[in-house]
Image (spheres, coloured by chain):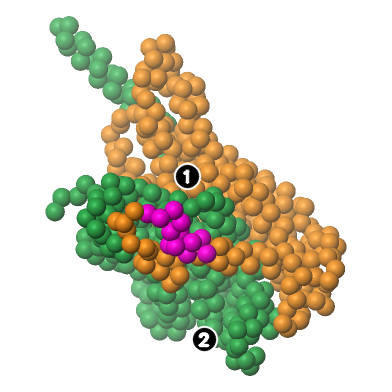
Amino acid sequence: MCLEGSYRTLNRLRRREAWTGLAFVSPGVIGLLVFAVGPFLASGLLSFTNYNLLEPPKFICVANYILLFHDHRFYIALWVTFYYAIVSVPLDLAVAVGLALLLNQRVCGLGIFRTIFYLPAVLPPVATAVLWNWILNPDFGILNAALHFFGIPKESLPQWLIAPEWTVPAYILMSLWGVGTAMIVSLAGLQDVPKSLIEAAILDGAGTWARFWHITLPMISPVLFYNVIQGIIGSFSYFTTPFILGQGVGSGSGTNDAGLFYALYVYQQAFSNLNLGYASALAWVMLVIILLLTLLIFRSSSIWVYYGGERR
Amino acid sequence: MSQALSVSTHPPQIGSPRPKVRPGRVVSYVALIVLSIAFLIPFAWLVLSSFKESDEIFLFPPKWIPTKFYWSNYIQATTVIPFLRYTLNTLLVAGLVALGNVLSSAFIAYGFARFRFPGKNILFIIMLATTMIPYQVLMVPQYILFRDLGWLNSYLPLIVPAFFGSAFYIFLLRQFMMGIPYDLDEAALIDGANAFQRFRYIVLPLTRPALTAVAILSFQGAWNDFLAPLIYLDDHNLFTLQLGLNLFKGSFRTDWNLLMAASVLTMLPMLLLFFLAQRYFIEGITFTGSKEG
């Protein structure tokens, strides 16, 4: 009798707790539905339509996806993005880890060095793009002046961002200036490597290289894994810099579309050409590519990523 | 890079007693200093170019130090384009976005951190999964939604979503709140505080460091954002600084000195924020890497 009463009280309390919790998360649920899940599904539907904002969307089945296979600019966008990602993701990661290793040696002035390396990553991308446009200016920029100083004759200086073959390399170069974020994440990973492991390895006579290869690298592999995925997503949604630097050159994407990054192409189709259905199809292909690559890296991660508590 | 790696690959013998100044250490410092200079050169080039006269801009090989510092470049850069107006516009948008993110994400995070309700974990996972969706997928339907609401050419599409929370900040704040001992909530509960009071007077004040990080990161994100303002704002009077700088670039294609001055001005507030609050930037970023990785 008494027990039953307390059960009922307990149930009432549980229910009340649930409702209160739901009340707190409800703005998040609304936001999730209206700004993420809804648009996500709508985008999928739109990709099967022809829509130009003025007339109502017309269902055209998979025509957009078929069109995509015959669209040479789609292939260019894929190529530019892959080229950029394949070089810049590993390169930036190596530089980020290299900088983090240097900073992790308990150097004096750590704060100053960290600030210098991290600073470019927090600045507005429009301003940094404008700055790099001037640095990379083939005729009056500081980079070609330096190359000339080191003996490259004037006529064979790279035509950064103007010659198609020097467009993606210019973006890769610029990406190096923004490794700060990956460096900070890597540094945090390095600082989490237990000192005891390193000391044990020293006692066992492991040299610095052996310690780096057999202890540090495996211990920070989850961080590397995270950075690789971020790098891939970043390459596919890389927009502001290519937009700013491509303006006024070719069709807004550099000479012969050499700077036509995928996200830029989606934007052009959606808001310059008003092919909103086709842009949605492009965006979905991008999503699928990102998911496939992530899955691939996830699958491979059991080989190269070490998680502390994992049982084998 | 090869320099950076070689530092750690060929150190002095380990195992023998360490000498006071290890050559490896010297190499590290040299590498750090050389790399720092490489990272700083673009800034130096930016600032020095911004003071040059237009004749001195087009020289090859370039001249580093301007013969005369033209402060008037800055005046010109801020008057040919309504820079003050754009700055105020950007402050308004970024300020409201930060406010919205702090208020709503804290509120939502509290629900996830302190209550049990059916479907909570699934909801949380879906919320985190949406952070994987690239903006390119969402931007077209969001544009259509905001057009149907009549919000085009206004700040509403930039600001309103922030008031419904952002998955990443909710995650960050939830983790932080879960580290706050339950005893305090229970004591307040016994004293008769309701859920909102416990949130407002117990948990929220203790979450302040994380709230500051959310405020700063979302302010920075909104200040630097280009794509969303580009999509939604047409009226030049409504432009944010990033759109203004882009407009500037389009109309003064070859006045690099003025463009550099304008770039310095749009960077300045972020530089200031970074120097004042570097800790929060680093904590926010470290959090992402360690928790999601």
Q: Which residue is drawn at 52% across and 64% down?
A: B30
Give the dominant element type of the magenta stretch: helix, strand or loop.
helix
Which image quadrant is residue B5 in? bottom left
Taking the image as drawn, is residue A304 in sight? Answer: yes
Seen in the image, is B29 located left or right of residue A304? Answer: right
Q: Mark 1 falls within which chain? A: B
Q: Which residue is drawn at 73% across and 78% down?
A: B62
Which image quadrant is residue B38 in? bottom right
Magenta-colored span: B18-30
Determine which residue is flagged by label 2.
A165
Q: CB of mark 1 within 8 Å of CB of mark 2?
A: no
Q: Residue at x 45, y 75 (%)?
A: A84
Determine which residue is flagged by label 1.
B283
**Chain B takes which shade in the image?**
orange
Task: Examine the rendered structure and indicate whether residue A158 appears above or below residue A178.
Answer: below
Which image quadrant is residue B6 in? bottom left
Task: Examine the rendered structure and indicate whether residue A173 appears above or below residue A42.
Answer: below
Q: Residue A20 carries which label?
A: none
Mark 1 to mark 2: distance in Å?
Answer: 39 Å
Q: What residue type is labelled 2?
A: Glu
Q: Is residue B17 magenta?
A: no
State which quarter of the image contains the N terminus of chain B: bottom left
Rendered green, the chain in question is A
The secondary structure type at the circle numbered 1 is: helix
Q: Position of residue A244 (x, y in %)?
A: 62, 70
